[in-house]
Image (spheres, rainbow, N blue to C red):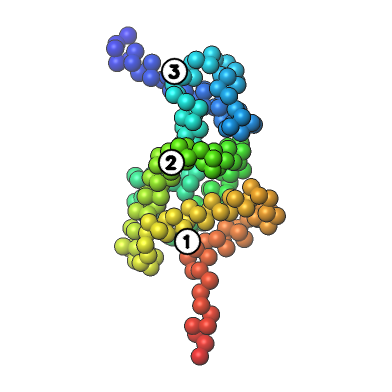
């Protein structure tokens, strides 16, 4: 076996072991919450020694960061657009783009153990300043930056009116995070309508058109 093939094989094994650990951590975090979960419980779930975890991750917080990153990669966790996707998504009209993005987000929240995982992340962000800083720096800030680029490109194409793109990107994130907060708190209307066309279309319409000024045309 060549050195290159042997190295590739080692990399595949390492990637598989990392994913095995992350899968186990996601299950334990979802069941117990991040704060109460222990690396021993994660190791037991993954059927490995606790020391093996530290061959791949320096601390428990690294597990949560990697899980969040993996979720974002798989299903647009925070309205994520990858840099190489901007041209592709520009082919979709703004209304259809927003509708699809909100639809993916709302479907994602209810899949598998995503909701308890998101709750674990939110809880840790609120109490752990170091984790909050990493979450913002490594995941949220880059995602908002790409979304701002996307908005700026649409402005240049004349598809949306000129706005402060970085600020509006933050509005979009805050809009979705706020609705998720209402869902978690048990708001009956948001929970009942979470995946309904009524809610999704109302969100898109509000973001594109706002409330308007009905008195503007009255004289």
Residues under labels 3 and 1: Cα distance?
A: 46 Å
> Which residue is drawn at the image coordinates 58% and 19% (left, top)?
40
Q: Secondary structure at mark 2?
A: helix
What residue is pinned by disc 3?
A: 55
Query: Is residue 136 left or right of 149 when viewed as pictured?
Result: right
Q: Secondary structure at mark 3?
A: loop
Residues under labels 1 and 2: Cα distance?
A: 33 Å
Above or below for 186 versus 56: below
Above or below for 184 versus 117: below
Residue 133 bears which disc, if any? 2
Q: Residues within 10 Å of mark 2 (few under 14, many from 20)?
A: few
- On-image quarter of the N terminus: top left
Residues under labels 3 and 2: Cα distance?
A: 24 Å
Instruction: Name the foreground residue: 193 vs 65.
Output: 65
Instruction: Name the foreground residue: 133 vs 219.
Output: 133
Q: Position of residue 76 (x, y in %)?
A: 48, 44
- Residue lying furthest left in this view? 3
Q: Position of residue 199 (x, y in %)?
A: 60, 59
What residue is pinned by disc 1?
A: 95
Q: Are marks 3 and 1 in contact (CB under 8 Å)?
A: no
Tell which circle, 3 or 2, labels the residue nearer the N-terminal end. Answer: 3
Marks 1, 2: nearer the viewer: 2
Instruction: Name the foreground residue: 84 vs 117.
Output: 117
Query: Is residue 147 left or right of 196 when viewed as pictured?
Result: left
Q: Position of residue 96 (x, y in %)?
A: 48, 58
Q: Residues within 10 Å of mark 1 (few under 14, many from 20)?
A: some
Tell which circle, 1 or 2, labels the residue nearer the N-terminal end. Answer: 1
Query: Is residue 7 left or right of 213 when viewed as pictured?
Result: left
> Which residue is drawn at the image coordinates 61% and 38% (left, top)?
116
Above or below for 218 versus 142: below
Q: How many marks?
A: 3
Q: Position of residue 214 (x, y in %)?
A: 53, 80
């Amino acid at each position: 076996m060549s050195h290159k093939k042997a190295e590739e094989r080692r990399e595949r094994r390492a990637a598989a072991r990392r994913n095995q650990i992350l899968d186990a951590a996601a299950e334990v975090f979802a069941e117990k919450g991040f704060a109460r979960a222990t690396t021993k419980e994660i190791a037991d779930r993954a059927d490995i020694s606790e020391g093996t975890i530290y061959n791949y991750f320096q601390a428990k917080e690294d597990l949560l960061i990697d899980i969040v990153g993996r979720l974002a990669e798989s299903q647009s966790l925070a309205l994520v657009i990858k840099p190489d996707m901007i041209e592709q998504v520009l082919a979709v009209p703004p209304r259809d783009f927003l509708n699809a993005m909100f639809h993916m987000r709302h479907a994602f929240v209810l899949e598998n153990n995503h909701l308890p995982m998101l709750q674990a992340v939110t809880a840790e962000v609120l109490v752990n300043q170091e984790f909050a800083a990493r979450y913002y720096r490594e995941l949220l800030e880059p995602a908002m930056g790409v979304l701002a680029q996307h908005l700026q490109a649409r402005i240049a194409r004349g598809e949306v009116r000129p706005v402060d793109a970085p600020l509006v990107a933050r509005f979009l994130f805050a809009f979705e995070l706020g609705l998720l907060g209402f869902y978690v708190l048990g708001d009956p209307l948001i929970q009942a309508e979470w995946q309904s066309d009524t809610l999704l279309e109302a969100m898109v319409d509000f973001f594109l058109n706002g409330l308007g000024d009905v008195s503007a045309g009255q004289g």
